[in-house]
Image (cartoon, rainbow, N blue to C red):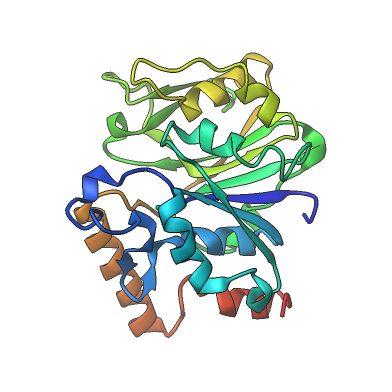
């Protein structure tokens, strides 16, 4: 998958996690024994992507550079891109347009925790399909997320951001593969009523062209949106239980890079 480039989004103001985020980037906060962004970076490494851009505010970029620098310790190429204003996920993706021009992208939000069996296999992407590939997860309270509506054939027909009356319990998580025309598609978006660009609007652009596939993460997979104090606590307890009980190290970039023979 070397032709696919990775984008790790670590911007935003982290307002739901104040006052923890008054002095630092949300994605550097500890989740049990690792900084939050390690869990998202691990997804990119499991997908065997070696060219990765980390996007964040200018004042936080130096903090991320202190962890892995140019990426050579992981056997990958890390670059750092500024998003001056938190203007939504599509805007953040567009910041890498010059760096990864004409390339398919694997975009992962920096607060996106994903764990489960054979995860590397789930994170495969056929760029020749020319489709966006999104991941869906079953939740009890879908109204807080982007809800995916499926037809009788199991095909995605719509995705709606935080609907009052969800049409399913399947929601889109913060991992997205986009084909090589994603920057062009973003340029066609208009801002939402929240005055920012919405990733669901980008996905729906692809849906109109029948260019969306979904990967359902069912029984055995664990996902957390690490945007609240409660989810930080839940995820930390889960990670602690697995690591102490089974001896597995969850989302260690160095370990993954070694297993994947990047280093």
Find the residue positioned furthest to the front. Answer: 59
Q: How many labels sit on residues?
A: 0
- Nearest the eye: 164 or 5: 5
Image x and y of residue 135, in percent = 53, 41
Residue 100 quadrant = top right
Residue at the image position 31 percent from the left and 76 percent from the top: 240
Residue at the image position 56 percent from the left and 72 percent from the top: 68
Image x and y of residue 118, in percent = 59, 63
Residue 176 quadrant = top right
Image x and y of residue 171, in percent = 42, 35
Residue at the image position 65 percent from the left and 56 percent from the top: 52
Find the residue positioned furthest to the left. Answer: 19
Q: Is residue 224 above or below residue 78?
A: above
Horizontal arrangement in the rendering, residue 22 relative to residue 261 (left or right): left
Q: Is residue 52 above or below residue 187?
A: below
Quarter holding the N terminus is bottom right
Residue at the image position 29 percent from the left and 68 percent from the top: 236
- Nearest the eye: 32 or 169: 32
Residue 243 quadrant = bottom left
Image x and y of residue 97, in percent = 68, 37
Horizontal arrangement in the rendering, residue 219 relative to residue 227 (left or right): right
Horizontal arrangement in the rendering, residue 147 relative to residue 179 (left or right): left
Asked if one can make out residue 220 in the rendered structure from this viewpoint, the answer is no
Asked if one can make out residue 28 in the rendered structure from this viewpoint, the answer is yes
- Nearest the eye: 198 or 25: 25
Quarter holding the C terminus is bottom right
């Amino acid at each position: 998958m070397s032709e696919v480039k990775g984008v790790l989004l670590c911007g935003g103001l982290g307002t739901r996690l104040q006052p923890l985020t008054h002095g630092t980037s949300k994605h550097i906060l500890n989740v049990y024994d690792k900084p939050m962004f390690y869990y998202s970076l691990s997804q990119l490494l499991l997908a065997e992507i070696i060219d990765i851009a980390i996007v964040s505010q200018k004042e936080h970029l130096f903090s991320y550079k202190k962890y892995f620098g140019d990426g050579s310790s992981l056997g990958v190429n890390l670059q750092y891109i500024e998003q001056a204003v938190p203007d939504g996920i599509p805007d953040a993706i567009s910041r890498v347009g010059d760096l990864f021009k004409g390339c398919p992208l694997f975009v992962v939000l920096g607060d996106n925790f994903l764990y489960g069996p054979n995860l590397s296999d789930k994170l495969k992407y056929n760029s020749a399909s020319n489709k966006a590939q999104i991941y869906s997860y079953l939740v009890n309270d879908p109204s807080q997320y982007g809800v995916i509506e499926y037809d009788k054939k199991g095909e995605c027909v719509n995705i709606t951001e935080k609907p009052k009356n969800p049409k399913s319990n399947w929601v889109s998580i913060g991992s997205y593969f986009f084909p090589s025309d994603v920057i062009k598609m973003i340029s066609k978006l208009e801002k939402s009523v929240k005055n920012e660009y919405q990733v669901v609007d980008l996905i729906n652009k692809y849906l109109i062209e029948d260019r969306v596939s979904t990967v359902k993460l069912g029984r055995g997979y664990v996902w957390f949106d690490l945007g609240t104090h409660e989810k930080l606590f839940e995820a930390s307890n889960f990670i602690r239980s697995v690591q102490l009980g089974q001896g597995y190290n969850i989302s260690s970039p160095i370990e993954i890079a070694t297993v994947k023979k990047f280093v």
